[in-house]
Amino acid sequence: MPPTIEIDTQWQEHYAWWPVRSSWSKKFIWLKKYWQGEIFYDAMGRPPIKERSWKLIYTENEYLMMLLRQDEKHYQRPV
């Protein structure tokens, strides 16, 4: 089995002039700011087949929760 690589996601902030569906909660985002992440390779190093990248769309609160949970993995809790 080939070694896995860490998934790198590029995030950009956008404004939803038209309704956009969130990838996580499946709610519509409209006339608000949202975050769009692009993943160019999966954990095995393979690119997507149909498009240039996979898209992740998060509301501002979902993006904040994702950042807070991501930091939780890197820090060890004292016993």
Image: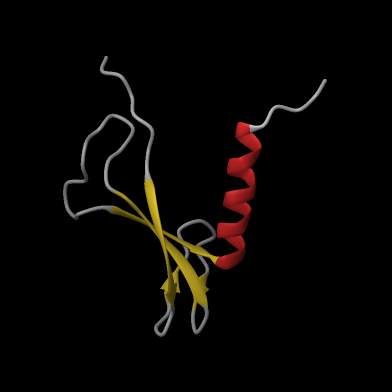
Residue 31 drawn above or below residue 23: below
- Image point (63%, 44%), residue name: 69
Question: Horizontal placement of 38 versus 47: left or right?
Answer: right
Location of the N terminus by quadrant is: top left
Residue sticking out furthest to the top: 1
Which quarter of the figure has residue 8?
Answer: top left
- Image point (20%, 54%), residue name: 52
* Rendering coords of residue 79 (x, y %): 82, 20
Which quarter of the figure has residue 18?
Answer: bottom left
In this figure, what is the number of numbered marks?
A: 0
Closer to the camera in the image, 19 or 5: 5
* Rendering coords of residue 55 (x, y %): 34, 57
* Rendering coords of residue 76 (x, y %): 70, 27
Residue 20 drawn above or below residue 77: below
Question: Horizontal placement of 51 versus 14: left or right?
Answer: left
Closer to the camera in the image, 9 or 22: 9
Residue 44 drawn above or below residue 37: above
- Image point (26%, 18%), residue name: 2
Residue 4 drawn above or below residue 12: above
Residue sticking out furthest to the right: 79
* Rendering coords of residue 20 (x, y %): 42, 73
- Display colour scheme: secondary structure
Which quarter of the figure has residue 38?
Answer: bottom left
